[in-house]
Amino acid sequence: MEQEERKTSVRSTAMVLPLFAVACAVFAALLLFSSGPGARLHAWSFRTGFAMIKAAGYIGLGCAVVALASSVIAARKRDFRGILVSLVALVLALISFGIPLYWKVQAQSYPRIHDISTDLNNPPRFVAISTERGAGVRYGGVEVATQQMKAYPEVKTVVLALPANEAYKTALLTARDLGWDIVAERPAEGTIEATDTTRWFGFKDDIVIRIVPAGDRSLLDIRSVSRVGISDLGTNAKRVRAFLAKIAPPHT
């Protein structure tokens, strides 16, 4: 009887490290996967969300080391339950560490700009949205234009084989199809202003579309600007590309 109790006690003690590793890894995963949704729901600020992602990465790395050590110890003792728990902890920990690391590497590959326009010399101007934001949406000038040309040389004014009024209707429908919130419609001026919300953090980015007649065709320009941050991780360029690909597919 005493021998059985001792074996049970030893097994319980042996599970302490694997259970600690999995608890630590779960905590790191919770930090990571709640960072954006929590900010989007206004439970905390986006800066807190960024700090949570960073913390999740460091904690995940530490948990991975603990889980690896735990799995080695469990393997030596032939404790299959300990091995399984340790491996679960290791996977969770590596996810919690790997995703922030991937995002950091990705961030370094994008230019530190958050204002993308197809017309760099005369970017479309915000009117209604400038009023909503309480300040004008200023363009960064040559510095921003230079970085954009280097990173996204394909983002340029589009020539549509449509008269201006038809191009305007098409642009408006395209913006709505992409799920943007239309803020202002000014068909007489050929401009549309809209706002898009990012999925993870719920950031509000502003868009303005400009249609200019060119004979029986039209010139279309679009500008997308983030409200916060310095680098947008390529979000605005992706949005502009998505719009242009939808309104003027490459094969046309």
Image (cartoon, rainbow, N blue to C red):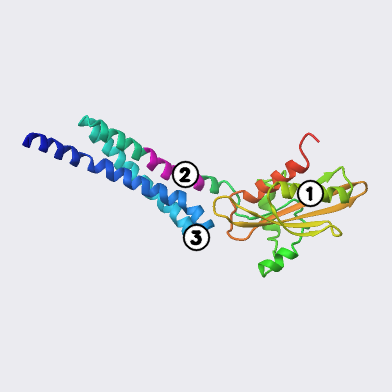
- Asked whether, in this view, residue 211 is left or right of residue 145, the answer is right
Which numbered disc, 1 or 2, marks the residue that appears first in the sequence? 2
- Which numbered dot is residue 141? none
Majority secondary structure of magenta residues: helix
* Residue 7: % across, % down: 13, 35
* Mark 2 Cα shell of 10 Å, populated few (<14), some (14-19), many (≥20): some
The residue sitting at 78% across, 34% down in the picture is: 251
Please tell me whether residue 237 belongs to the stretch shown in magenta.
no
In three-dimensional space, the C-alpha distance between marks 1 and 2, rounded to whole angstroms, equals: 36 Å
Indicate the secondary structure of the residue bearing disc 1: helix
Local packing at callout 1 (Cα closer than 10 Å; few below 14, some 14-19, many 20+) is many
The nearer-to-camera label among 1 and 2 is 1
Identify the mark at residue 99; answer none if there is no mark: 2
Instruction: Say what secondary structure mark 2 lies in.
Output: helix
**Pointer 3 residue:** 47
Residue behind mark 1: 171
Between 122 and 33, the residue placed more toward the observer is: 33
Contact flag, marks 1 and 2 (Cβ < 8 Å): no
| Relative vertical location of residue 186 with respect to residue 234 in this rendering, above or below | below
Q: Is residue 252 left or right of residue 35?
A: right
Q: As shown in the figure, which amino acid type bears the numbered disc 2? A: Ile
Residue visible at 18% across and 37% down in the picture? 11
Q: Which residues are magenta?
A: 91-104
Q: Where, by quadrant of the figure, is residue 193 drawn?
A: bottom right
